[in-house]
Image (cartoon, helix red, strand yellow):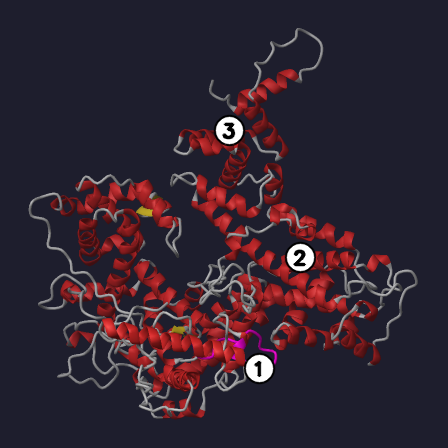
Amino acid sequence: MPPKSPRRAGAARSQRASPDGGSAPPAAPRLEVGEADFVALCDALKVSEGAREKAWRTYESLSAADGAPAYNKKKKETWGVCIFIVAIDLDEMTFTFTELLKSISISVCTFFQFLKEVDVNMDTVSTKVDSTVSRLKKKYDVLLALYHKFERTCGLIYLEQPSSEISAELSSVLVLKNYWITFLLAKGKVLQVEDDLVISFQLLLCVLDYFIKLSPPAMLKEPYKSAVTAVTVNGSARTPRRGQNRSTRTSKQIDTDTKVIEVLCKEHDCNLDEVKNVYFTSFIPFLNSVGIVAANGLPEVEVISKQYNELYLKNKDIDARLFLDHDETLQPDVIACSQLERTPLKNNPDEELNLILPQTPVRAAMNNIQQLIMILNSATDKPSDTLIMYFNNCTVNPKDSVLKRVESLDRIFKKKFAEAVGQGCAEIGSQRYKLGVRLYYRVMESMLKSNFSKLLNDNIFHTSLLACAVEVVMATYGRNASQSDGTSAETDLSFPWILDVFDLKAFDFYKVIESFIRAEPSLTREMIKHLEHCEHRIMESLAWQSGSPLFDLIKQSKEREGQTDQPEPTSTLNLPLQHNHTAADLYLSPVRSPKKKASGPPLSATSTPDAPPGVTPQTQKPQKSTSLSLFYKKVYLLAYLRLRTLFFRLLSEHPDLEPLIWTLFQHTLQNEYELMRDRHLDQIMMCSMYGICKVKNVDLRFKIIVSAYKELPNTNQETFKRVLIREEKYDSIIVFYNLVFMQKLKTNILQYASNRPPTLSPIPHIPRSPYQFSNSPRRVPAGNNIYISPLKSPYKFSDGFQSPTKMTPRSRILVSIGESFGTSEKFQKINQMVCNSDCQLKRSAEVSAAPKPLKRLRFDIEGQDEADGSKHLPQESKFQQKLAEMTSTRTRMQKQKLNDGNDTSASEEK
């Protein structure tokens, strides 16, 4: 018998509850346990009747779909997910997220994973629900990382068993509870963007500072005890209250004592000026707003908890107080949280463990920030003398326009940052902008050494360059708590937020990215990967938005006399992608004819130079656009790599279909580029794959394509759930295929089923990345376990750059060239490993050709370094020889970094 609807269950329940008197209502049929439990769950969560019915229908549709037995085994969890989905869609959240988790006895991580499994059809979970879940995930990740850091930090501050003079109410448990709930309240009231890990941690340090200064020195460990004692000696006398041992201190004294915050910043590698800024502009106003500063001693836990509870019920999300109880609903998924980089691995479990512990999210964020600050310490927020010299050599001196632009965008950025993060955080935004300005001038000076002077009066170039510099700073500070792999996670301030702030077109921003990376060699691997990700975002969707200069360039390319209707000929697809262009080539294209000289800088559809041009566009016919040509080459490469990845997941048994799908995909981008307007590259890719499989009678449903697509990196469910059909009307990708894609390309698609299919498009040449990551560990030949890498990001910055032995790779033995690293046993082990590798090389040479040398890194068999030709003395040990070679190799790696940009013989290293 099928389960009854919730409405019938509710009616039956009301009949049982009828008052006495009169004729008894007819007996209700016996309810199934599952249905009764569903009603009880809805009652507990105060779900409305309309939401109940829709949630039940959602559950019934899931039960009828493939994989229904799994849902039947987890009925309560499935009901909870269905109720959550419907409540979000209907804006009827009558419960908090934590209340839901408690009601169905499930953890945060398990709930998110189960929701992902439930979303088998594209219409089960809406983009609105996806957005809500994304926000909850980010908030949970930040809270989890901060609580772990909080627990460890408090263990370093407070004695486990303080002297008996300390009252019971100042026990470690009470202190932890008071600290944490005060921090949660401060975070909720100060920050609108609660997934900002850096500002949240700086705010946590402010809370710690406040409470440490109110704690009796007898409770504290060093160096906090000395810092508090020094404050007391300097005049902030403590007046303990009998029975409470609390300190009566004035607001002014608390505000001006900085010794404790200095210790906290030093211990946690935080920038003191930034934390002080948060303290005085955000934390002190928070204390005043909740009436804590003027009070004597520690705030009452009950009072703070009550205020936080009001905030929690208003937001209807996660009750972070439960971290204090190690509540099972907030416990992390161990498997999901353990995906950390471990290369090279320790290969002998019996040997002494000498692995470097992976960095926590907070530590990684602080290290990235400190590294950026150290790089920019020598830079200024004004043009240098060298830049001024370049400015003075221009026909129209751009100095005034540069300074005015920087000042104007400063005001805009500060305002937008405060609107996004919190009104009390405006000065924090100003600090970050100033770092971006320093990087902007630094990169500009580096670019000018490569003859970029043509761009000094180009407004869009300067805005793009400044935006790129600020984006690097924002991404450095915006590291999300879940980024164990160093990649960028989406936040409210993530790219393309900076484009909206600066009112900059994505296509214009794209032009500066590659030149920016080349001009700033100190960029970390993470930042290079982030900018490369920004470039991909632009190529896949942002550059194709209505109003983009890209469409004007394509139109101009069609109007060129004698040119075919294609932005980039297919004949160039299998040619290597050259990287010898500059930003000037991109911003000042289309290129003028060399036979006609102009008295001013050339115009383009995408640049607006401040200096007036000497020749108007009407006097010359349109020329080929360098920026458009390069853009299309990169788009083709990105498109093919995406297609290849998805293809091998789905159609590896049909290799003959790959060139057909690619040809249709490439044809659409080249000839039907209007289909890309306000859409995504991957939407065209999935439609191309489905269309070819359809005409070739290969059974591949869109549901399968979408399921595989969701597993690809850097994908968004909105890509297939919300596709533009026509003006302001959106639907799923299936509807887009039927109503738009198929209608436009039906004739072309049907040709693939005929005896005369279209000419196949060449496969794009796949080069190695133009962005070299010099800090990647490189393996010594012959399959041994010896790796070499240049100095990497330090594990801790407190005392400057520490020994590389504190850094990755996290192998059994770490060697720092020119520095003692332990006992003689380590030398013997390394010497043995190197000797074994030599033996392997010699054996392989006897049976085959000489081993292929590794690019950038090679230990020659005969003991001669191939780069400098140096000979080793016969009496030197094998280890001494290899040590000398390793030293030479490491010094060469930076010099050779740019020389390998066009080398396609080696495999791409990520």
Element on which disc 2 rests: helix
Q: CA distance from mark 2 to mark 3?
A: 36 Å
Residue at 31% from the left image edge and 73% from the top image edge? 770
Quarter of the image holding residue 41? Answer: top right
Q: Amino acid at mark 2?
A: Leu
The magenta segment: 788-805
Numbered tag placed on residue 910 in the rendering: none
Crowdedness near tag 3: few (<14), some (14–19) or many (≥20) residues, C-alpha within 10 Å: some
**Residue that label 2 marks:** 184
Q: CA distance from mark 1 to mark 3?
A: 62 Å
Q: Is residue 682 left or right of residue 257?
A: left
Along the line of sight, the residue nearer the viewer: 711 or 617: 711
Numbered tag placed on residue 800 in the rendering: 1
Residue lying furthest left in this view? 756
Element on which disc 3 rests: helix
Residue 136 vertical placement versus 54 (above, below): below
* Tag in front: 1 or 3: 1
Residue at 23% from the left image edge and 65% from the top image edge? 632
Query: Is mark 2 in CB contact (under 8 Å) with mark 3?
Result: no
Q: Amino acid at mark 1?
A: Gly
